[in-house]
Image: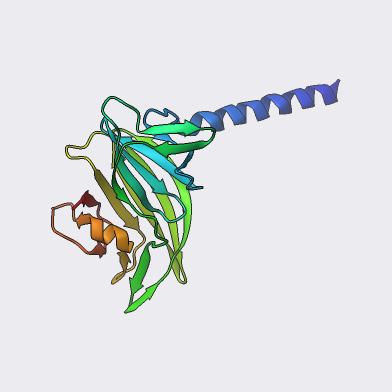
Amino acid sequence: MKRFLVSLLLGVACSLVAQAEEASQPELPFDRALINRYSLDHLPRSISIRQANDFWLGYDLERATLYKAWRAPENKSGLKGSGFVMRSVGQTLYEDKSNETWRFQHNGNTMPLDIRYLGCSQREGYFELQWELKYDKGILTLHERVPMSPKNPIAREIHVDSLPSDGQLLLPAPMQKAWKLATAKGDSASSLSDAQWYQLTTR
């Protein structure tokens, strides 16, 4: 009888802990009208996010960069699915099929980064993606926001945590050519050199 009561109490305790953990976790954005986690255009690890009514942004999660931006046909979906693979539909506005990714510059040295995707969360008015960028002496955290209803699509916001003094995070080459990077005050920038939120808009 005593063993039965102990087992029962342990079972109840475990159940309460699991419920508490589940309640503490933020709600994941599974609304496929806004965000889709299936493979985009056969890119294995990718995510697609809708911005405003017609615009879509597809991310290469392994490279921590935007793979594609496109505009859906009027009054139609910007994604067409088959199984667990999605295909972008509409006018392509930007596409990066290269292997280029972020680089870290410090003390005159430019070095590659090991990238690990940390996840996506839905906030009030925007989605936020996060990546860990690891170099030989430390770890940076890259954040990218995708506003749901910006004044001028397509717009993005990025910032980096734990950047050492005199350190710079260099944009991938295709992004440098096609996107304009600006500080929160609107001044042009060529790299991320501090922890402020930078703006990215198409050229």
Most foreground residue, 136 or 103: 103
Question: Which of the 4 image quarters holds residue 171?
Answer: bottom left
Taking depth in this image into account, of 8 and 15 the one nearest to the observer is 15
Residue at left offset 36%, top offset 36%: 89
Depth check: 71 or 195 in front? 71
Q: Is residue 184 left or right of residue 38?
A: left
Q: Residue furthest bottom?
A: 108
Assign the N terminus to one quadrant of the image.
Answer: top right
- At horizontal 31% and vertical 60% (from top left) the residue drawn is 174
The image position of residue 67, as x and y in percent, is 37, 50
- Is 186 on the left or on the right of 23, as rendered? left
The answer to whether residue 23 shows anywhere in this view is yes
The answer to whether one can see residue 37 in this image is no
- Asked if residue 111 is positioned above or below residue 187 in the image, the reply reads below
The residue at 30%/41% (across/down) is: 70
Report which quarter residue 53 is drawn in.
Answer: top left
Q: Position of residue 121 (x, y in %)?
A: 41, 38
Outermost residue toward the right? 1
Vertical placement of residue 123 versus 60, above or below: above
